[in-house]
């Protein structure tokens, strides 16, 4: 956790009223930037991360020493080209990479806040990140982009701040968490809560760690990020370093071993309480609720140009749900493009090397950056 | 650029709101965007073509005219364009009524099955016509509902659709088309271009 002291952050002094009613102030938002903000400050892109992401979207993550979560899409010469754009990515509040969250140390007790942390929403996350735009004195972002929970933040951002982004690109997401989405998140949370090491969220104080529960949560979630076809092709019924079944509960199959590995590496980089809080925020997400179920009304004042992207094999946030966003935008005559990208990599497609996706995204940003600038001149 | 597109673009008023249904690679959209109006949207069924359009900065939605025109409110566009695809729909009548609901006016172009070469082809060979404009065999053609210029005239009058303006293309030459010269134009031209409204 000491390493976290080196991450960039700003302290938000201005009080922020949360959806739960509580007010927070003097809290940290940690962030990373890529590329250079130009003189006109017209090349800034705010990228929102997904459930288990963080501010280290590209390059080497200094905490985990792994590649940033969006290394395929973001970087020099990539779709989100850092030679051209200035990219800001913040750790969401509730997260565990330096921003205000359940693992933040309570100054009074010297211990992590744990479950005394307030329940937050996607709206709260977006409002907190908005401070960064003011911090960098950016009048209008060129684009807001994000996949999955990042896409939900894109939608919330343009709804809250209708004239603060030229382009909005929500990817593989939804405007309202479905019963199935909530069900999977609940499964993950119950796995954590069932781990006796969770200790009502005070595991640091008790010098334990609910690793088993968090790993199971990750394993279950990981399955939802992949497609049946993708899993079948990669693993099938292949056995793990053995010639035959062992008639035991060891990881006989490669897929079992793979999931166990995914679970075990996850607990090294993620906080169990953060997992509870962030999945809860996703479940509470229903953009049209405030507008009596009329999603179009959430965007009624928007000046942004939208590009909605979904993937054929994504069954967690399927095309039909992405299309609902398109339909709501068309109903109010907003400028919205939409494509479903062919991929058998499931929901995770947006994080992976899917050339059709990366090319389309890159070209879209490049062409529109040119148009937006021409218009201003 | 195709002569057909030039004729279509001449029918479109400056700065009007336009939807190009079946916009393909966005050639017409691009031309209209550069010359007529920036308020232009496209609907296209092929993923690859949608990706191409979006890459060019055109606002295109992946979708099919038979299902996905529904999402647009009444009269949300000044012009809705349907270029040479009416004959490929299962229910062309429904598509036309959707075009006229979504758009204040619609521009529909149709390959003319009454063109003399088509007629002669059927008469002489006794087989379904295969021509430059209709290159497919009967068993693999996407064209389910071919019609002639006269058929389209009749359809419009039966459904009380006003033909605001109509043109015929004969070897890339745009000719005026009216009830008076219909018999002749129906024989000599490959394509009809209709500006219609409810």
Image: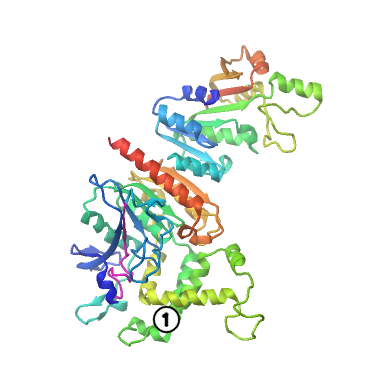
Residue A103 % position (x, y): 30, 76
Q: Is residue A324 left or right of residue A145?
A: right
Q: Is residue A101 left or right of residue B123?
A: left
| Image position of B38 with respect to A260: above or below | above
| Image position of A338 with respect to A269: above or below | above
Residue A262 % position (x, y): 48, 73
Q: What element carries label 1?
A: helix
Q: In this view, does A161 lie to the left or right of A343?
A: left
Instruction: Identify the residue position indicated by label 1 in the image.
Output: A211
Count the numbered circles shown: 1
Q: Which of A317 and A5 is in front in this view?
A: A5
Magenta span has A101?
Answer: yes
Q: Is residue B16 visible?
A: no
Magenta span has B20?
Answer: no
Q: Can residue B164 be seen in this view?
A: yes
**Corner quadrant of residue A72:** bottom left
Residue range of the region highlighted in magenta in the rendering: A86-103
**Residue at left 25%, top 47%?**
A38
**Residue at left 64%, top 22%?**
B190
Residue A194 % position (x, y): 44, 82
Q: Which of B150 and A101 is in front in this view?
A: A101
Q: Residues within 10 Å of mark 1 (few under 14, many from 20)?
A: many
**Residue at left 40%, top 61%?**
A149
Residue B102 % position (x, y): 49, 35
Q: Nearer the viewer, residue A325 or A331?
A: A325
**Corner quadrant of residue A22:** bottom left
Q: Subunit of mark 1?
A: A
- Judged by its main secondary structure, the magenta piece is loop
The C terminus of chain A appears in which quarter of the rendering?
top left
Q: Which residue lies furthest to the top in this view?
A: B180
């Amino acid at each position: 956790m000491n390493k976290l002291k080196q991450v960039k952050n700003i302290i938000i002094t201005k009080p922020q009223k949360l959806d739960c009613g509580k007010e927070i102030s003097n809290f940290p938002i940690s962030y990373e930037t890529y590329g250079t903000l130009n003189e006109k400050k017209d090349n800034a892109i705010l990228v929102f991360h997904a459930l288990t992401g963080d501010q280290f979207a590209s390059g080497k993550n200094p905490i985990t020493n792994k590649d940033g979560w969006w290394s395929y899409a973001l970087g020099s010469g990539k779709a989100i080209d850092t030679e051209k754009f200035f990219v800001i990515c913040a750790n969401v509040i509730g997260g565990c990479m330096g921003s205000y969250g359940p693992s933040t140390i309570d100054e009074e007790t010297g211990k992590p806040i744990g479950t005394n942390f307030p329940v937050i929403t996607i709206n709260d996350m977006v409002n907190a990140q908005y401070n960064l735009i003011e911090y960098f004195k950016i009048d209008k972002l060129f684009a807001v982009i994000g996949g999955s929970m990042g896409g939900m933040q894109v939608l919330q951002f343009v709804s809250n701040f209708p004239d603060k982004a030229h382009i909005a690109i929500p990817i593989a997401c939804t405007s309202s968490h479905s019963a199935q989405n909530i069900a999977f998140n609940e499964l993950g949370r119950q796995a954590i809560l069932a781990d006796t090491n969770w200790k009502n969220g005070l595991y640091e104080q008790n010098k334990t760690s609910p690793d088993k529960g968090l790993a199971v949560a990750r394993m279950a979630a990981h399955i939802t990020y992949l497609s049946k076809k993708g899993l079948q092709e990669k693993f099938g019924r292949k056995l793990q370093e053995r010639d035959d079944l062992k008639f035991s509960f060891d990881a006989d199959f490669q897929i079992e071993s793979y999931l166990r590995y995914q679970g075990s590496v996850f607990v090294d980089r993620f906080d169990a309480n953060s997992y509870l809080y962030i999945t809860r925020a996703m479940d509470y997400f229903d953009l049209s609720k405030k507008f009596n179920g009329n999603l179009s009304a959430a965007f009624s004042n928007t000046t942004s140009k939208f590009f909605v992207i979904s993937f054929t094999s994504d069954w967690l946030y399927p095309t039909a749900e992405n299309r609902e966003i398109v339909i709501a935008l068309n109903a109010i005559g907003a400028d919205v493009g939409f494509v479903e990208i062919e991929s058998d990599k499931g929901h995770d497609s947006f994080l992976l090397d899917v050339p059709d996706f990366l090319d389309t995204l890159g070209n879209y940003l490049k062409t529109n950056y040119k148009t937006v600038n021409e218009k201003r001149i | 650029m195709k002569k057909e597109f030039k004729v279509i673009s001449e029918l479109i008023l400056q700065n009007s709101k336009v939807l190009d249904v079946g916009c393909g690679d966005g050639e017409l959209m691009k031309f209209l965007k550069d010359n007529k109006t920036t308020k232009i949207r496209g609907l296209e069924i092929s993923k690859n073509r949608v990706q191409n359009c979006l890459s060019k900065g055109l606002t295109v939605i992946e979708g099919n005219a038979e299902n996905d025109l529904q999402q647009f409110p009444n009269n949300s566009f000044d012009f809705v364009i349907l270029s040479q695809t009416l004959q490929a729909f299962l229910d062309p009548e429904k598509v036309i009524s959707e075009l006229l609901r979504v758009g204040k006016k619609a521009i529909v172009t149709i390959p003319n099955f009454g063109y003399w070469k088509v007629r002669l082809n059927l008469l002489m060979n006794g087989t379904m016509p295969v021509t430059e404009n209709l290159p497919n065999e009967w068993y693999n053609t996407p064209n389910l509902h071919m019609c002639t210029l006269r058929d389209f005239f009749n359809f419009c009058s039966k459904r009380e659709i006003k033909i605001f303006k109509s043109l015929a293309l004969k070897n890339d030459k745009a000719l005026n088309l009216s009830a008076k010269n219909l018999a002749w134009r129906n024989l000599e031209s490959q394509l009809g271009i209709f500006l219609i409204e409810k």
